[in-house]
Amino acid sequence: MFYPKAKKNTAKRRFSFFLYDVALVFVFLFVLLIIPLFIIPLVVEEVSALYGVIFYAVRAVMVLVGIPAILYLTNLIFEFQKKKVIIHEDISPATSHLKLFTISKKNYKYQILYGFLIFFLVFLPIDFFTFLLLPDTVVYQALVLGVRSTNIYLSPLTDSYLVFLISAIAIQISVAVTEETIARGFLAKRGSEYFPKMSAVMISSLYFGLGHLAYILDLYSWYPVLWFVQAFIIGIILSLFVLRKMWILPVILAHTLNNIVSAHTIWSFWHGISFKILVFVIYIPLFIVGILFIVVCVLLVWPLSNVKRGFSNGFELFRSYFKKEKEEKSVGDSLFRVFFDILIGCLIFLMGMLIAI
C-alpha cells in the first residue's frame, strides 16, 4: 500500500524508537528485575516491613543503572540505523539520559523549589479532591495496594507509626525514582530525540496513565479509569517540565511527597482513622504551607510574569500537538500521527508489563 512521505516518516520514527530502544531496554530491565524476586526472600521474610523497602530500593537501583547501560550498548550496535530516523541527538543517548540527573551548586536550590511547587500545584490538589469527593477511592486504594507483600507497611499488620513512616519515605523515594526515570527520563526524553517533543510527551503520558488503569486487573472498578485520566494529565505536565528544564530531580521530589501523603491516607484507613480527620491534620496544613510557599516564590524567586510565561509556553506547546507539523501536508497526516502515538503508547505499556513484576 502506498503511503505519503509524512506518514512513512511518522511510522518509521516511532517503530524505530520502540524496537531499537524501548523493547531492548524493557527486556534488559526484566532480566535485571526478576533476579531480586528470587534472592530477596532468601534474605528477608516477605511478612517483614523491611522486605518492601529492599524490594523497591533494588528496583530503583536496577533502573538507574540499567537504562543508561542498555542505551549505551544499543547505540553501539544500532548506531547506523538510528542515525536515519533520529531528529535530535548531540551527544550519546546514555550521556543525554544521565545529564537529567545533574545537580550543581547553582541550580540545586531551584530544583528543590520546583519540586515543592509541582507538588503543591499539581499533585496535592488532584489527590485531595479525589479523596474528598469520592471517599470510596480510599477504600479501593487500600485494597489493591495494602494487601501486597511489598506493601506490608500500608496494611493493618503495621501498627507502629514510626515503622510505617520510615518505610513510606524509603519506599516512595524508590518508587518515584523508578517511575520518573522510566516515564520521563527515558520515554519522554529519548522519544523527543526521535520525533517532536509533544509526541514524546503524549506517548510517555499514555504509558504512565495506562499503568494506573492496570489496577483494574487487581480489583474491578471504574476508579482506575479516573486514575488513568489523572495520571495522563500529570504525565503531560511532568514531561513538559523535564523536557523544558532538563531536570528530573524536581519531578522525583514532587512524586515522592505526593506518594508519602497518599500512603498516610491508606495507612489511616486500615487503622480506623477517618479521612475527615486527615483533612484537618494533614491536607489543610499542607494547603496553607503551599499557598505561603507559592506567595514567597512569586515575591522573592520567580516574578509573576515568568510564572505566567511558563504556563503560556507549556499550553502553546500542548496546542501545537494538534496542528500540522512541517512535513505534514493534510489533516489526514496529522490524524495518522496522533493514531500512531496512541498505538506506540499502548505497545510500550504492553511491553512494560514485563517490568511490572
Image: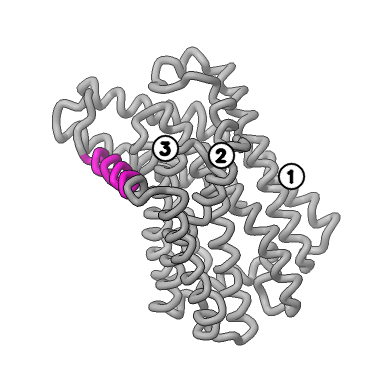
Q: Quadrant of residue 17?
A: top left
- Residue 1, visible in the rendered structure: no
Which residue position is annotated with label 1?
Answer: 35
Span of residues in magenta:
308-322
Residue corresponding to mark 2? 107
- What secondary structure is the magenta-colored segment mainly? helix
Q: Are marks 1 and 2 in contact (CB under 8 Å)?
A: no
Which residue is at the far right? 43
Quarter location, residue 130: bottom left
Residue depth check, mark 1 versus mark 2: number of the one nearer the observer: 2
The answer for how far apart the CA atoms under marks 3 and 2 are is: 15 Å
Mark in the foreground, 1 or 3: 3
For the point 51% across and 68% down, which residue is it? 289
What kind of residue is marked 2? Asn
Q: Position of residue 355 (x, y in %)?
A: 59, 46
Query: Which amino acid, mark 1?
Result: Ile
User: Circle 3 — which element?
Assistant: helix
